[in-house]
Amino acid sequence: MFASSLAVSLVASGGSSRADADIAAQRDIGDYLMKAIQVCWNMPANTRSVARVRISLNKDGSLAGPPKIVSPVTPPLDKVAEAAVRAITRCAPFPGLTSFAAHYDMWRDVILTFNPGEDSPGEPLAADAIDKLFEKYSKKTK
C-alpha cells in the first residue's frame, strides 16, 4: 500500500516556453512515474521525514545512473530516503516513458519527493502537490 505522497518534478534542461500539450505531457509523465514507483515503495514505519531523489533516465526509460538523494528535506538522512532509492531501483526501468519520447528533454532528469507524513494510510496521492511542483517548473522555464 502506498500511504504517502510522491510528487514528481521534471527538471528543465532548456529554457523554452511550454504549450498546453507540454503541460499535459508533464502531468502524464508524473502520473506514470508515481504509479510505476508505487508498487515498489515500502513506507518506513514511524517516520515523518521527507526525501527528494533525483533520477536521470535514458531514452528507453532505464536509469542512466544510480538515484541520488538531492536532500532529505527533513534531516537527517533516514529510512525514507533509503526506501525511496530502493523503490526507484527496484521498479526501473520505466518503459512507459518511451511513449513520451518527443518530450525526452522533459523527463531526462526527474526529482521525486517522498513524503510519508502527508497523507493518511489508504488515501490516494495528493495530486495538488504535483500541480504545485509543475507550476514552479513552468514558471522557471518561461
Image: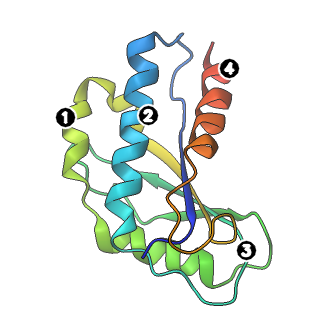
Which mark is on residue 48? none
Which mark is on residue 49? 3
Indicate the quadrant where residue 74 lies.
bottom right
Which mark is on residue 27? 2
Along the polypeptide, which appears first: circle 1 or circle 3?
3
Dots 4, 1 in contact, CB < 8 A: no
Count of residue discs: 4
Say which residue label 1 marks.
Answer: 99
Q: Residues within 10 Å of mark 1 (few under 14, many from 20)?
A: few
**98 left or right of 112?**
left
- Identify which residue is drawn at 33% across, 47% down: 32
Q: Is residue 45 above or below residue 120?
A: below
Along the polypeptide, which appears first: circle 3 or circle 4?
3
**98 left or right of 139?**
left
| Residue 61 screen position, x and y as percent | 25, 49
Q: Residues within 10 Å of mark 3 (few under 14, many from 20)?
A: many
Along the polypeptide, which appears first: circle 3 or circle 2?
2
Element carrying mark 3 = loop
Say which residue label 4 marks.
Answer: 139
Q: Residues within 10 Å of mark 4 (few under 14, many from 20)?
A: few
Can residue 37 be seen from the camera position used here? Answer: yes
Along the polypeptide, which appears first: circle 2 or circle 4?
2
| Residue 47 screen position, x and y as percent | 70, 83
Dots 1, 2 in contact, CB < 8 A: no
Mark 1 → mark 2, Cα distance in angstroms: 14 Å
In the picture, the quarter occupied by the C terminus is top right
**Pick the front one: 131 or 113:** 131
Along the polypeptide, which appears first: circle 4 or circle 1?
1
